[in-house]
Image (spheres, rainbow, N blue to C red):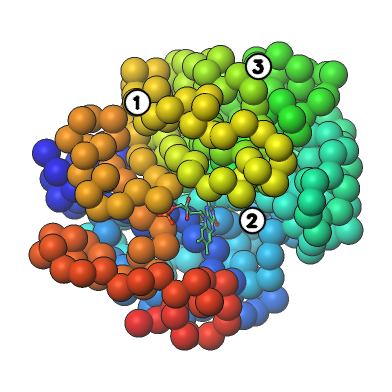
Amino acid sequence: MNLFTPFTLGSIKCQNRIGMAAMSRQRCDNKEMIPTQMMKQYYMQRCTAGFIITEGLPLSLDSIAQDGSSAIFNINQAQAWSEIVEALHQKGCKIIAQLWHCGRVTNQIKTPLAPSAIKIRNSKYNEPKEMSIDEIQEVVKQYLECSKLIKYAGFDGIEIQASSGYLLDSFLKGSANKRTDEYGGCVENRCRIVLEIIDKLGSVFDIQRIGIKISPITRQYDSYDPNPKELYKYLLEQLNQRKVGFIEIRDDDYPENWLDFGYPSSKSDIENVFEFCRPLFKGQIIGNGKVTPERGEELIKKQYCDAITFGRLFTSNPDLVEKIKNGEKLNEVDTSTLLSQGPKGYIC
Ligand SMILES: Cc1cc2nc3c(=O)[nH]c(=O)nc-3n(C[C@H](O)[C@H](O)[C@H](O)COP(=O)(O)O)c2cc1C
């Protein structure tokens, strides 16, 4: 078994085990947040991937991290996405919509929403407000409404963004969640919003086509849990009970994420996050986070992961699948165009 062996992600049949990770590239140039022809071209250039996870799609105007995002919270956006979905399907590539609420990681609104009114230290972001129970329920409802549009647009699956310091990660992790109600405190309470969202999505979409992106050991945007083993053991058990199709695990090897906040290093909590999660989760595991093609092969061979998503490597190598297959040299990532405007560094 290797990166090129076909497989089934939950119940999504994929031509290989190489996926493109979600990347917001800020290229949507209309305020209606409707995906454009240039975006379609970008996704199509990467259609030899077994599956593509879209850029994070905000649920609402409150949930946007940055300018240039596209979305899927209204019918016009969904119709434009359906054209991209259809074009990728014709090439045999599967596409999963990522739903994203950025929580306190935004400067698009004055008062961001978060589990608790705790500012991200050493950052440009404003102090957020602690969400009321009604606001939490409203967000859960927004996930449900977006999932109906995702189904309408013909996507193969949905990924819930619950990693990297954004809203759901900040609910999960103790440093950002100091609530004293049923959404904070013990592990069961901190996982509640994620599980409520999954239950809602499962009422619309085949649960085997639903997945969640997690980052048990990241400290990104000041979201840190001192006891990730207990937290993720419970969360993954709950996902198993619901028969969730897949999880994408983001590894962490970014010292700035812990040094900036005075946290212990990521690897001090869990040395190999893929190995740790494997026996805990019954569905498919996607590995991500500075994974090289060589490490990806090894993670699959050892069966810690079933597939790998590459992020930045796909930006500079749209033909990443062919290059890995042929052992060709990969282009360097151009960091200056990761988040910029226009076709430069986007369309190859
Ligand atoms: C420009 C850029 C935008 C990103 N946007 C998102 C996003 O919208 N949603 C998300 O879950 N992760 C996002 N990420 C993180 C990637 O999905 C991935 O987890 C990360 O880049 C690590 O994988 P890599 O080392 O293969 O790039 C982004 C990363 C980059 C570089």
Residue found at x 75% / y 23%:
183
N-terminal of the pair, mark 2 or mark 3, is: 2
Residue at disc 1, secondary structure: helix
Give me the C-alpha separation between circle 2 and circle 1. Answer: 31 Å
* Closer mark to the observer between disc 2 and disc 3: 3
Dot 3 beta carbon under 8 Å from ligand 1: no
**How many other residues sit within 10 Å of disc 2, few (<14), some (14-19) or many (≥20)?**
many
N-terminal of the pair, mark 3 or mark 1, is: 3
For label 1, the residue is 275
- Which disc is residue 187 wearing? 3
The amino acid marked with disc number 2 is Pro
Dot 2 beta carbon under 8 Å from ligand 1: no
For residue 73, above or below residue 329: above
For residue 123, above or below residue 242: below
Q: Is residue 238 visible?
A: no
The amino acid marked with disc number 1 is Glu
The part of the image, by quadrant, that contains residue 231 is: top right
Residue at disc 3, secondary structure: helix
* Closer mark to the observer between disc 3 and disc 1: 1
Is 221 situated left or right of 53 in this image? right
Residue 120 x/y as whole percent: 78, 46
* Closer mark to the observer between disc 2 and disc 1: 1
Q: Are marks 2 and 3 in contact (CB under 8 Å)?
A: no
Q: Is residue 116 visible?
A: yes
In this view, the residue in front, 192 or 23, is 23
**How many other residues sit within 10 Å of disc 1, few (<14), some (14-19) or many (≥20)?**
some
In this view, the residue in front, 292 or 86, is 292
For label 2, the residue is 58
Residue 261 x/y as whole percent: 72, 41
Residue found at x 27% / y 59%:
49
Residue at disc 2, secondary structure: strand
